[in-house]
Image: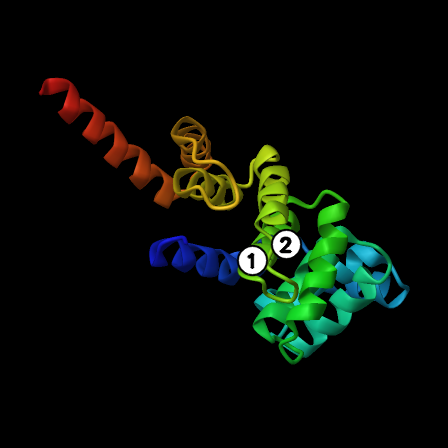
Amino acid sequence: MLTKRFFFFIFLFSLLTISTYPSYAQDSQINITELEQLANDGDPDAQCYLATLYLAGKGVSQDFQKAFELATKSAEQGNPHAQGLLGALYVKGLGVEKNSKKAFIWFKKAAEQGNPLAQSDLAIMYFKGYGTEQDYEQAHKWFQEAAKQGDSSAQYNLGMMYIKGVGVKKDFNLAINWFEKACENGNTSACEICTKLDNATKSNTKK
């Protein structure tokens, strides 16, 4: 089994999901009136964009229920960002009651459309058996899909799977490869591991 440390990071990443679905709320040049009109007219991109604003309280009063309603409308039209966001809302119970099975469904829809954040979250669902049966093989598959697109948390988690041999054969070299990639993409936990391993290697070399 994986260490408690790994489970902590798996849980942490699931909590971080919402702040990164997607990055629209960082845009300061927003015309809320025009956005509301587009959303009311059924534009899925505008609905998703507006959902993130209500979620973050950027340019509008924070309203989780409104964010959920807009994300749902957009997700039902096939917007992968909204589908991932909706999955995260179901996981955290923001604007709606927590529902792991519905979260899994929406993460899967978004993941199958190539959304790397949703792919990483879907992997977590499979890994933990949350909203679906536990399946390390599927967890590995979706972590890989996300990792190949540069998702640092997926890269980190792949490293942990390989170094612990959970769902895969232990492979120290592959683990280091994924830790290094995660570190390059800003994952501080992966950087800490790389530093410790580097120091250990230097220490052994001196002996």
Q: Position of residue 152 (x, y in %)?
A: 50, 41
Q: Position of residue 157 (x, y in %)?
A: 47, 45
Asked if the residues shown at circle 1 and circle 2 are in contact, with their CB atoms under 8 angstroms apart, the answer is no
Helix, strand or loop at disc 1? helix
Give the residue furthest to the right: 41
> In the displayed structure, does residue 46 sit left or right of residue 173?
right
Q: Residue at x 84, y 55 (%)?
A: 78
> In the displayed structure, does residue 93 sit left or right of residue 105?
left
Q: Does residue 59 show up?
A: no
**Mark 1: which amino acid?**
Thr
- Quick one: label 2, few (<14), some, or many (20+) residues within 10 Å? many
Q: Residue at x 76, y 47 (%)?
A: 112
Residue 115: mark in rendering: none
- 67 shown above or below 207: below
Q: Residue at x 69, y 69 (%)?
A: 101
Residue 122: mark in rendering: 2
**Mark 2: which amino acid?**
Leu
For mark 1, what is the residue? 17
Q: CA distance from mark 1 to mark 2?
A: 11 Å
Quarter of the figure with the C terminus? top left
Q: Residue at x 63, y 54 (%)?
A: 122
Q: Nearer the viewer, residue 3 or 111?
A: 3
- 180 shown above or below 110: above
Q: Does residue 148 show up?
A: yes
> In the displayed structure, does residue 69 sit left or right of residue 59?
right
- Figure quadrant of residue 58: bottom right
- 159 shown above or below 202: below
Q: How many marks?
A: 2
Q: Nearer the viewer, residue 4 or 32?
A: 4
- Quick one: label 1, few (<14), some, or many (20+) residues within 10 Å? many
